[in-house]
């Protein structure tokens, strides 16, 4: 079932499982089924209890902590649009990266902003060449398409990114201390410089490194 779940669906499912309170478990199950089947809740409310119980059994896979794992793809295609996944932080658009990371500081926010996070490092490919945000495709349009990406693929990309990002964060304090000895920086300048100069890995070998770690 995981292969049928998109980023947008996963965000809704996560909210139902973790962020909403229900008087009865059947209410939660009906909302989960409504998202999975892309059907109105009314359909399930009109089912006999015996049939509803059978339907609810289809949500059991959501209780499994680990979803299927795949290798992080070099490219993804959504609704006919092809995107190259940038695994080297230094090659990302600093402004979009900063916006995404500052708006998603907690675990819940990472999930609820996953479409925007993916959009920050999935660049459109136009006629075999990388496009530019705002010219070939606006950032939010990319985010809308990322919401339709299968969650299994999206999870592989995001997991790689957060591993690199967490490693990168450990180096920021010492780096900023050295920079601030020479001149004062705004927070935006500091983060941008850190992204540009302290990212771990390089684009040509990042995917190979990940494959080695995952083997």
Image: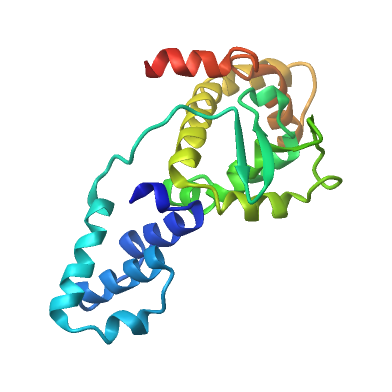
- Whole-percent x and y of residue 146? 60, 49
Q: Which residue is the extreme one toward the bottom?
A: 46
What residue lies at 70% left-to-right and 54% top-to-bottom? 140
What residue lies at 50% left-to-right and 41% top-to-bottom? 154
Horizontal side of residue 206 vs 120, given as left or right: left
- Whole-percent x and y of residue 150? 48, 47
Q: Which residue is the extreme one toward the left?
A: 50
Q: Is residue 194 visible?
A: no
Vertically, is 198 above or below 34?
above
Vertically, is 74 above or below 200?
below
What residue lies at 52% left-to-right and 34% top-to-bottom? 157
Vertically, is 94 above or below 108?
above
Q: How many marks?
A: 0
What residue lies at 33% left-to-right and 66% top-to-bottom? 32
> Which quadrant: the C terminus?
top left
- Whole-percent x and y of residue 120? 66, 40
Horizontal side of residue 119 vs 185, given as left or right: left
Q: On the image, which quarter does residue 54 sit in?
A: bottom left
- Whole-percent x and y of residue 184? 78, 27
Horizontal side of residue 42 vs 83, given as left or right: left
């Amino acid at each position: 079932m995981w292969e049928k779940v998109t980023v947008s669906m996963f965000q809704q499912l996560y909210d139902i499982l973790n962020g909403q309170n229900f008087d009865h478990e059947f209410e939660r199950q009906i909302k989960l089924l409504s998202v999975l089947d892309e059907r109105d809740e009314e359909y399930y409310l009109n089912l006999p209890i015996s049939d509803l119980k059978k339907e609810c059994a289809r949500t059991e896979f959501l209780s499994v902590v680990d979803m299927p794992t795949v290798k992080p793809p070099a490219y993804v295609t959504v609704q006919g649009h092809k995107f190259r996944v940038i695994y080297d932080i230094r090659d990302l658009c600093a402004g979009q990266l900063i916006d995404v990371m500052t708006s998603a500081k907690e675990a819940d926010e990472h999930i609820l902003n996953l479409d925007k996070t993916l959009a920050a490092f999935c660049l459109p490919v136009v006629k075999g060449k990388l496009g530019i945000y705002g010219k070939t495709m606006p950032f939010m349009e990319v985010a809308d398409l990322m919401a339709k990406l299968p969650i299994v693929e999206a999870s592989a990309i995001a997991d790689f990114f957060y591993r690199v990002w967490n490693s990168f964060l450990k180096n920021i304090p010492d780096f900023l201390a050295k920079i601030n000895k020479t001149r004062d920086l705004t927070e935006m300048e500091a983060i941008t410089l850190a992204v540009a100069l302290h990212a771990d890995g390089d684009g040509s070998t990042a995917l190979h490194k990940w494959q080695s770690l995952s083997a």
